[in-house]
Amino acid sequence: MKTFIPWAKPSLWGNEKKYVADALNSLWISGGKYIEQLEEGFCTLFNKKYALAVCNGTAAIHLPYLSLGLKPGDEVIVPGFSFMAAANLALQMHLKPVFAEVDPVTWCITANTIEKLITPNTKAVVPVQTYGNVCDMDNLVSLAKARNIQIIEDCAESLFSKYKDCYCGTYGYVGCFSFQATKTLTTGEGGLVVTDDDEIYQRMILYRSHGLGVRGTYGHVLPGHNFRITNMQAAMGCAQFEKFEKITGERKRIHQSYRRVLERQHGFVLQHFPQSVDPVLWAFAFKLEPTAFPQGRDTVIRQLKEKGIETRPGFTASSMLDIYEKHRLPVCENLSQNVISLPTFAGLKEDDINYICTALLELKR
């Protein structure tokens, strides 16, 4: 058996230790220059007026929920197949998550899948850009504008992916990103939001830091949270951000290497990326065909682990989770039962990719 290949691991690119040490030595370990530098870098790259660095990707979604003034009973449409941060936050705020079916080939929501779910109580739609794919944002934005609904893009898994030559996260009212340890750019934990809206930005600043209107005073303007990121985390993020082109190049290399082997093999249905999308994958994922893998996806995961390869199952469909109101989403459920994702991290070697693919092909029946 080869040395264990993890599903994900962070990569360091040169200046992480230097910048973190500088932040520590400056004694600005909460606020500081690296937070501002990271925010300014994203504003410039994404051509957005505002960026706010926060403590994690979930906080990045929570901020716009709060700042949009969503109230108990308001409905938020989310995908039924995705990581459920947006849905869980909705429940915590006593909003109603409404789950949309996803497209069976892109695994993303579409204007068609959400339009029939819109009611007078619908206040927001959260397109989750799953595994690095990007939804058909033109049609989603057109529908949302026509129905006076806000779009909050959850781009935790698709940092630096593009839709029609623009970065994802720049099409919605707010774009939300994660810098968690497995993500494309990492600060350990952390996240960021971008927007062009003056009012929403000012409200997000307040909610990020206890609702305090004037720094250094205790005058709470609104009941805020502490969603702040530390200067040391932002320092690591700045070092990573400097190398974003190298990071994206590595992830694209890995994507193409897997695809070259598996897309022509029977038994694998790869996630489809439309021509309008230039993806930067968080994870390389695909469906296993039951006819080729009658032992089932979960058994395949165990068999690969025995060969020293860590993988992950697809997300659990919302309709298969007891914490949500009962509903049925056949496409999401099928994906949930058959999707598997392979090790996908910058620095993964070609011989490791070949070993993973060979091991997987040996498990076909």
Image: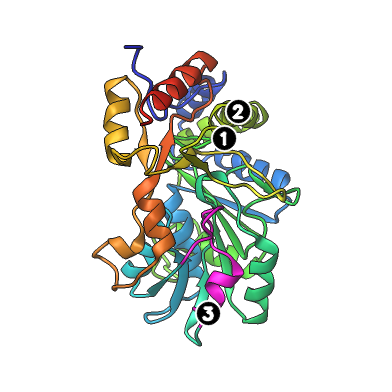
Residue 114, position as x, y percentages in the image: 53, 72
Residue 339, position as x, y percentages in the image: 41, 45
Q: Distance between the residues labelled 3 and 1?
A: 34 Å
**Residue furthest left in the image:** 322
**Residue 227 seen from this side:** no
Inspect the image, locate mark 3, and give the three-letter code of the amino acid beneath it.
Answer: Lys
Q: Name the residue under label 2.
A: 260
Quadrant location of the N terminus in the rendered image: top left
Q: Nearer the viewer, residue 220 or 310?
A: 310
From this view, report whether residue 179 is shown above or below residue 134: above
- What sort of colour scheme is used for the picture? rainbow
Residue at position x 48%, y 55% in the image: 60
Q: Toward which corner of the image does residue 362 lie, by quadrant?
A: top left
Residue at position x 64%, y 51% in the image: 168
Inspect the image, locate mark 2, and give the three-letter code of the amino acid beneath it.
Answer: Arg
Q: Is mark 3 on a helix, strand or loop?
A: loop
Q: Distance between the residues labelled 2 and 3?
A: 38 Å
Q: Residues within 10 Å of mark 1 (few under 14, many from 20)?
A: some
The stretch in magenta equals 101-118
Which label belongs to residue 106?
none
Inspect the image, locate mark 1, and give the three-letter code of the amino acid beneath it.
Answer: Glu
Q: Nearer the viewer, residue 214 or 171?
A: 171
Q: How many marks on residues? A: 3
Which of pointers 2 and 3 lies earlier in the amino acid sequence?
3
Q: Name the residue under label 3.
A: 116
Q: How far apart are marks 1 and 2 (CA)?
A: 6 Å
**Residue 275 seen from this side:** yes
117 in magenta: yes
Residue at position x 44%, y 29% in the image: 343
Residue 39, position as x, y percentages in the image: 61, 45
Residue at position x 49%, y 21% in the image: 353
